[in-house]
Amino acid sequence: MAKILICDQPVIQPTGEVACSAWQVADYESLLQQQDLNQLSQILTDFDPVLFAAITGGLLLSFAGAHIAGVVVKTMNRS
């Protein structure tokens, strides 16, 4: 079984180094079976079509708006 070390209270020094006063040993397999980790993994990997549609729609509208504004400015400069 794979074991990993987990720092309880990390302290970041001004030099950028991390110091730890207390360590815990955990099994990798038991850590993967915890509910919180599984829930986080699901949240990060699930596809949300509503969010995708909102982001894509916003990007398309901003592109179209900028393109139209560019054409208007170009046309006004010619006259």
Image: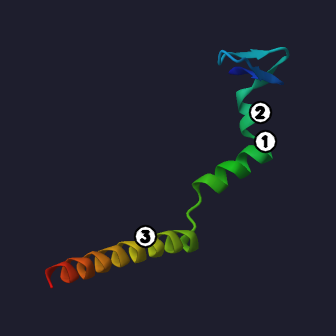
Q: Provide the secondary structure element on which disc 3 rests.
A: helix
The residue beneath circle 3 is 59
The residue beneath circle 2 is 30
In the image, what residue type sits under mark 3?
Leu
Q: Provide the secondary structure element on which disc 2 rests.
A: helix
Q: Are marks 3 and 2 in contact (CB under 8 Å)?
A: no
Q: Please report whichever mark, 3 or 2, sits nearer to the chain's N-terminal start.
A: 2
Is 65 above or below relative to 2?
below
Q: Residue at x 66, y 15 (%)?
A: 15
Q: Looking at this view, name the residue that lies furthest to the bottom.
A: 79
Q: Residue at x 73, y 17 (%)?
A: 13
Is 11 above or below relative to 68?
above
Q: Are marks 2 and 1 in contact (CB under 8 Å)?
A: yes
Q: Residue at x 76, y 23 (%)?
A: 6
Q: Residue at x 66, y 56 (%)?
A: 43
The residue beneath circle 1 is 34
